[in-house]
Image (spheres, rainbow, N blue to C red):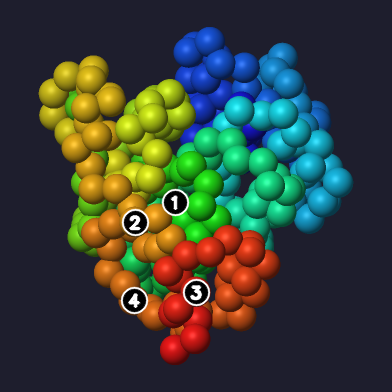
Amino acid sequence: MLVVGSTGSVGRETVRALTAAGIRPRALTRSRERARRTLGDVDLAVAPLRDAAGMADAVAGVDGIVMVHGATGDARPEDVDYGAVPAVLRALAGASPRIVLMTSMAVTHATGSWREAMHWKRRGERLLRASGLPATIVRPGWFDLQPDGWEALALEQGDATPVDSRRPVGRAQIAETIVQSLLCDEAVGCTFELFAAPGAAAQDWPSRFAALAHDRPGEVDGALDPREPPLHEEPDRLLDDLRALGAPGAWQAQLRR
């Protein structure tokens, strides 16, 4: 199971959760030394996102891909939050493993300083849905702000929660949800926001995923998401990547408007 963003805070939790579930992780990293220091003795794939040959080696033979990456420091969201998605899709070259992509709450309506990052995260979502690959998109709230005893999880849809609400979810809770999304067929085609809630931890994951509205095949937006902005108003980078997919879908009609 390839983990993109493996040395980040959620990535480290995800590697641990996969290992605990008996799933062998393969950590994608740009720095072998940092990954060894951070993750210990796990399989490593050392390649920057722009290295096409290295990325092809990284995805070779995997059953699934977890994408928990995010831009930090001077990195541009366009290059990282979004850029990792087309890099992985190109590397797959027609293979179709399960994919779980972590983005964020408020990707459809963030303003102010959050605006650019959230818009590029959503563009990554749109490209992944258009690919037709079996995917789940998880949109967590604010990391690790939950009070003691908030072990339950709320899976919501429609992206209605403002980013400044500071609704929390634990990094370990995100990682567990990602692992369950990989293990449960009912999670394929789901886009949902994830928040901690008072109470005990979830047990019946298949039923929880089955109860969600599933994304419509061939569409670029989540099942209950707003349809704005129109696809033809998106930047050329996304539109070019969509055309390069070669995957049919209802989204193609939006490009001709």
Marked residue nearer the N-terminal end (2 or 4): 2
- The residues tagged by marks 1 and 4 sit, at their Cα atoms, a distance apart of 17 Å
> Is residue 235 toward the left or the right of residue 147 in the image?
right
> Residue at horizontal 23%, vertical 18%?
203
Residue with the most extreme right position? 53
Cβ–Cβ under 8 Å for marks 2 and 3: no
| Local secondary structure at mark 2 | loop
Image quadrant containing the N terminus: top right
| Local secondary structure at mark 3 | helix
| Local secondary structure at mark 1 | loop
Q: In this view, does 229 lie above or below 59?
A: below
Q: Position of residue 127 (x, y in %)?
A: 53, 61
- The residues tagged by marks 2 and 3 sit, at their Cα atoms, a distance apart of 14 Å
Which of label 1 and label 4 is nearer to you? 4
Marked residue nearer the N-terminal end (2 or 1): 1
Cβ–Cβ under 8 Å for marks 1 and 4: no
Specify few, some or many for label 4: CA neighbours under 10 Å numbering under 14, 14-19, or 20 or more.
few
Cβ–Cβ under 8 Å for marks 2 and 1: no
Three-letter code, disc 3 = Gln
Residue at label 1? Answer: 103
> Is residue 79 toward the left or the right of residue 255 in the image?
right
- The residues tagged by marks 3 and 4 sit, at their Cα atoms, a distance apart of 16 Å
Three-letter code, disc 2 = Arg
Which of label 2 and label 1 is nearer to you? 2
Which of label 3 and label 4 is nearer to you? 3
Marked residue nearer the N-terminal end (1 or 4): 1
- The residues tagged by marks 2 and 1 sit, at their Cα atoms, a distance apart of 19 Å
Cβ–Cβ under 8 Å for marks 3 and 4: no
Image quadrant containing the C terminus: bottom left
Residue at label 3? Answer: 252
Which quadrant would residue 113 be assigned to in this image? bottom left
